[in-house]
Image: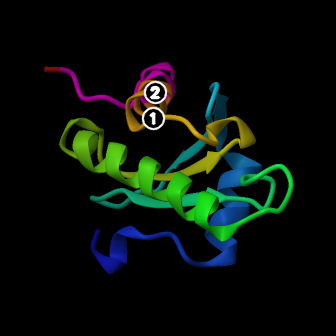
């Protein structure tokens, strides 16, 4: 992912949360908003609720982010351009396979009508 394609500024996150739309799925929550740019900007988040139930580990949070990033990379060419997107991992993502997380992400993207028509 290029640097310009990553959401970083607090103002951008706030605008997406307040003025954007959200879709909840089994393993993720998806926020999106039009950005008037010719490319998409994304963020992949996993809160401290994601992790082992006894001790919350960064290992599980990093794995959750990796699963979401990899699935996004696979579909990147099929997704409409000009949006800011935030993918947030739910605690149910713990121990799931990449395929299952991918199905959840794909359902959220379909509900948001983010895929280009062929």
Q: Which residues are magenta?
A: 106-117
Q: Nearer the viewer, residue 97 or 12?
A: 97
Is 1 located above or below residue 90 in the figure?
Answer: below
Do labels 2 and 1 touch, CB within 8 Å? yes
Crowd tier of the residue under label 2, counting other residues whose Cα lies within 10 Å: few below 14, some 14–19, many 20 or above: some
- Residue nearest the viewer, comparing 43 with 11: 43
Q: Is residue 36 above or below residue 22?
A: below
Q: Nearer the viewer, residue 15 or 5?
A: 5
Residue 93 sits above or below residue 48 on the image: above
- Residue named by callout 1: 97
Q: Residue at horizontal 73%, vertical 63%?
A: 14
* Place of residue 34 in the rendered image (x, y in percent of width and height, measured from the top left): 48, 48
- Quadrant assignment for the N terminus: bottom left
Check if residue 112 falls in the magenta segment: yes
Which mark is nearer the camera, 2 or 1? 1
Q: Is residue 14 magenta?
A: no
Could you say which is closer to the camera, residue 18 or residue 88? Answer: 88
Identify the mark at residue 100; answer none if there is no mark. 2
SS assignment at label 1:
loop
């Amino acid at each position: 992912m290029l640097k310009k394609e990553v959401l970083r500024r607090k103002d951008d996150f706030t605008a997406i949360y307040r003025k954007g739309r959200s879709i909840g799925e089994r393993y993720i929550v998806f926020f999106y908003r039009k950005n008037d740019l010719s490319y998409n900007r994304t963020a992949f988040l996993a809160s401290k609720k994601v992790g082992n139930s006894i001790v919350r580990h960064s290992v599980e949070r990093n794995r959750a982010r990796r699963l979401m990033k990899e699935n996004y990379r696979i579909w990147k060419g099929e997704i409409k351009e000009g949006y800011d997107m935030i993918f947030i991992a739910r605690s149910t993502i713990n121990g799931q396979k990449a395929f299952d997380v991918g199905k959840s992400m794909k359902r959220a993207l379909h509900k948001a009508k983010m895929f280009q028509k062929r």
